[in-house]
Amino acid sequence: IWTVGAATDSLTRIDTAFDGSSLTIPVGSDAVDVAAGRDAVWVSNGAAGTITRIDPVSLRLVGPPVPTVRFPTALAVGV
């Protein structure tokens, strides 16, 4: 399970398959939505006007945040 926290500017992964442990990583200002695909997890950072890409295996940011034209509030990933 992936969840974001706007107040903490973070992304949290909750491991439901093993022990319910969680890991939180900073992603950007005002993290408001998350979308997970096969090769990446994307987080919209509303106040920053960016989208952050995270590697779902290493849980590391992939490159710098991607700027958007407006404040991103929702994401979707196609398969």
Image: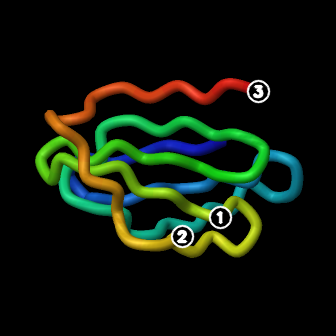
Which residue is identified by label 1? 55
Which residue is identified by label 2? 62
Apparent side of residue 21 relative to residue 47 in the rendered image (left or right): right
How far apart are the two marked residues, 3 and 2, measured between alpha carbons?
A: 20 Å
Q: Residue at x 17, y 37 (%)?
A: 69
Q: In which quarter of the image is the C terminus?
A: top right
Which residue is identified by label 3? 79
Graded by Cα atoms within 10 Å as few (under 14), some (14 to 19) or many (20 or more), the crowding at tag 1 reads some
**Who is closer to the viewer here, 68 or 27?**
68
Graded by Cα atoms within 10 Å as few (under 14), some (14 to 19) or many (20 or more), the crowding at tag 2 reads few
**Who is closer to the viewer here, 26 or 69?**
69
Q: Residue at x 41, y 56 (%)?
A: 52
Q: Quadrant of the N terminus?
A: top right
Residue type at the position of mark 2:
Val
Q: Which residue is drawn at 39% across and 35% down?
A: 33
Q: Do the residues labelled 1 and 3 touch (CB within 8 Å)?
A: no
Q: Is mark 2 on a helix, strand or loop?
A: loop
Percent x, y of residue 50: 26, 51
* Circle nearer the N terminus (3, 2): 2
Q: What element carries label 1?
A: loop
Apparent side of residue 13 relative to residue 45 in the rendered image (left or right): right
- Using the image, determine if residue 28 lies above or below residue 50: below
Percent x, y of residue 7: 20, 51
Q: Which of marks 1 and 3 is in front?
A: 3
Residue type at the position of mark 3:
Val
Residue type at the position of mark 1:
Asp
Graded by Cα atoms within 10 Å as few (under 14), some (14 to 19) or many (20 or more), the crowding at tag 3 reads few
Q: Which residue is drawn at 30% across and 38% down?
A: 32
Q: What element carries label 3?
A: loop
* Circle nearer the N terminus (1, 2): 1
Apparent side of residue 34 relative to residue 46 in the rendered image (left or right): right
